[in-house]
């Protein structure tokens, strides 16, 4: 604090003068950069523009640009860049960095394309910016272009390219980069090894990821977290739990990311009580940790425990985010607990999250399962934006509440709004046809799943159609439909055939269903 106070006093002194030398400005700007004092730097820039008679050299402006870019101050960086009479590659790179940090991808690309000269830093910045802002394909295209232009990728370029490969699940490209990393002797870099571990884990090559992890001598906390989460993502939660023990023995203390992943692993193994024990032992919990435990309870069928934990979280003065609220509302839906669901709806309004897609979809589902379909529709109608999950929640909600005509009408609205239905949509639509015995419409909708929408009918769709055809007395058609299925009929299909055949007195078909169950 003393150093910052002294710096502010020095800036005050310079700004009190009518003139100052370029050297004086440069010295203080460098101090601002070292201290990350962006406000004092802006004061210096303003004073310099009005009182420095000679144009400042690019070095001084570049230092200011670098500071603005570091903190994502895009407008300040743009304004300064536009005022600069002289620009060099460092100036352009600083502006690229500002665009990358702010996520302004269109400006990032446009600025890169109009650069008079590009160096390795230029490519590093745009490749990392594209990869970090979920443009992996474009990131890898520029990675290849960099090599074509004769610029050798640095260690950090390779990290960004590996991250892009992981996002695309492009194992072939990831292996090519791995080969290049070996050739350039970069495997000693912990960031490279972490990126390789993550890429292999996300691409399903968990054993290769573990092989690399075991040979990394300078593991850091990120290394452990990536390997632990890799096991969870690859359906091996037991190994994740074992790795937590190894992590502690190595002297690395788990952080919030570790805790959230381990909680998910325990719950996947059906060990929610052990997850809670680990949760209780961890002192420095954040909202992600609380949400992980809430979701773990919900996925373990422990909805009441999820609601109790949510109340504990509020008492600890943690503000829920959209993911937390949607998880708790989903628990209320499973319990058909209207009282708690309405209370959490109120909380979401106070938090300004009631129009969030995740929260709204969960609220629609909750009100539908509690039988308050009009309240569900009210939530749906006031949403500023919708996605297919929202439409599905309302369509299935109508079907569950016997509002079959409303179900089909809403489905038509969904198509008119240019949303692409998925398998869940058609479960709701076919269920509505089943409730109202809309045989011909049901057949049309079933055929459209593959013919118009490019989907493969699921077992649930076939079960609906077998039920619909059977209840209308078309047992033979139901049997033919089962025989034409591209996948093996399951218990639900055969039990449905048995039920409708027995009801209609078709002994042969009933025996077929009974014999296959």
Image (tube, rainbow, N blue to C red):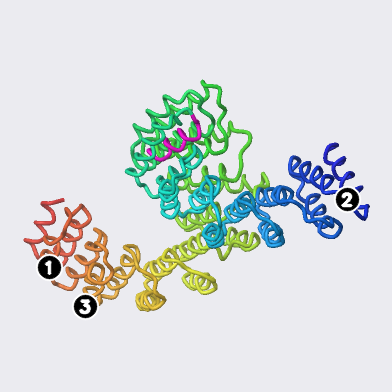
Few, some or many residues within 10 Å of mark 3 (<14, 14–19, 20+): few
For the residues marked 1 and 3, what is the alpha-carbon distance in whole angstroms?
Answer: 15 Å
Q: Is there any visible trace of residue 339 in the rendered image? A: no
Residue 203 rendering spot, x and y as whole percentages:
35, 42
Q: Quadrant of the N terminus?
A: top right
Which element carries disc 1, helix, strand or loop? helix
Q: Nearer the viewer, mark 1 or mark 3?
A: 3
For the residues marked 2 and 3, what is the alpha-carbon distance in whole angstroms?
Answer: 87 Å
Give me the residue at 41% from left, 76% from top.
Answer: 417
Q: Earlier in the sequence, mark 2 or mark 3?
A: 2
Few, some or many residues within 10 Å of mark 1 (<14, 14–19, 20+): many
Q: Is residue 193 magenta?
A: yes
Q: Is residue 403 magenta?
A: no
Q: Quadrant of residue 111?
A: bottom right
With 410 as the anchor, is 502 left or right in this view?
A: left
Give me the residue at 41% from left, 66% from top.
Answer: 388
User: Which of 324/258 is in front?
Assistant: 258
For the residues marked 2 and 1, what is the alpha-carbon distance in whole angstroms?
Answer: 95 Å
Please report the bounds of the magenta region as a residue range. 189-200
Q: Which mark is residue 20?
A: 2
Residue 266 rendering spot, x and y as whole percentages:
44, 36
Q: Which mark is residue 475?
A: 1
Which element carries disc 2, helix, strand or loop? loop
Q: Earlier in the sequence, mark 2 or mark 1?
A: 2
User: Which of 44/439 is in front?
Assistant: 44
Q: Is there any visible trace of residue 436 in the rendered image? A: yes
Q: Nearer the viewer, mark 2 or mark 1?
A: 2
């Amino acid at each position: 604090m003393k150093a910052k106070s002294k710096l502010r006093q020095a800036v005050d002194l310079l700004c009190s003068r009518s003139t100052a030398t370029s050297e004086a400005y440069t010295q203080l700007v460098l101090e601002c950069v070292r201290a990350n004092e962006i406000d004092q730097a802006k004061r210096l820039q303003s004073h310099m523009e009005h009182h420095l008679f000679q144009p400042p050299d690019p070095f001084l402006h570049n230092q200011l640009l670098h500071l603005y870019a570091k903190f994502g101050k895009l407008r300040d960086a743009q304004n300064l860049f536009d005022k600069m009479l002289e620009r060099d590659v460092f100036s352009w790179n600083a502006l690229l960095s500002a665009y990358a940090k702010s996520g302004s991808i269109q400006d990032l690309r446009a600025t890169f394309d109009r650069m008079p000269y590009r160096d390795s830093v230029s490519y590093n910045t745009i490749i990392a910016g594209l990869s970090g802002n979920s443009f992996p394909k474009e990131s890898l295209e520029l990675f290849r272009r960099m090599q074509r232009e004769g610029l050798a990728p640095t260690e950090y370029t390779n990290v960004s390219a590996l991250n892009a490969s992981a996002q695309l699940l492009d194992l072939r490209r990831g292996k090519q980069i791995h080969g290049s990393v070996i050739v350039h002797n970069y495997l000693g870099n912990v960031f490279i090894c972490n990126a390789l571990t993550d890429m292999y884990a996300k691409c399903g090559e968990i054993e290769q990821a573990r092989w690399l992890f075991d040979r990394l001598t300078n593991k850091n906390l990120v290394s452990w977290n990536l390997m632990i989460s890799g096991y969870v993502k690859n359906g091996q939660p037991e190994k994740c739990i074992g790795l937590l023990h190894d992590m502690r023995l190595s002297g690395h203390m788990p952080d919030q990311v570790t805790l959230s992943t381990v909680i998910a692993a325990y719950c996947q193994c059906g060990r929610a009580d052990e997850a809670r024990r680990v949760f209780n032992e961890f002192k420095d919990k954040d909202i992600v940790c609380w949400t992980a435990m809430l979701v773990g309870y919900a996925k373990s069928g422990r909805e009441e425990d999820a609601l109790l934990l949510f109340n504990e979280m509020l008492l600890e003065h943690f503000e829920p985010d959209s993911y937390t609220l949607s998880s708790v509302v989903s628990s209320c839906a499973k319990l058909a607990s209207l009282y708690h669901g309405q209370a959490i709806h109120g909380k979401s309004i106070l938090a300004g999250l009631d129009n969030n897609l995740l929260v709204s979809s969960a609220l629609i589902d909750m009100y539908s399962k509690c039988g308050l379909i009009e309240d569900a529709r009210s939530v749906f109608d006031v949403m500023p934006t919708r996605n297919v999950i929202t439409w599905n929640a309302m369509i299935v909600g109508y079907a569950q509440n016997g509002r079959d005509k409303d179900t089909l009408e809403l489905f038509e609205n969904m198509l008119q709004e240019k949303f692409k239905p998925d398998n869940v949509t058609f479960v709701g639509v076919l269920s509505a046809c089943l409730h109202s015995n809309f045989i011909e419409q049901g057949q049309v909708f079933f055929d459209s799943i593959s013919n118009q929408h490019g989907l493969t009918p699921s077992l649930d769709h076939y079960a609906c159609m077998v039920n619909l055809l059977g209840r209308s007395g078309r047992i033979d058609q139901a049997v033919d439909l089962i025989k034409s299925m591209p996948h093996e009929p399951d218990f639900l299909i055969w039990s449905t055939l048995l039920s409708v055949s027995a009801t209609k007195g078709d002994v042969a078909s009933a025996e077929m269903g009974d014999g296959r169950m």
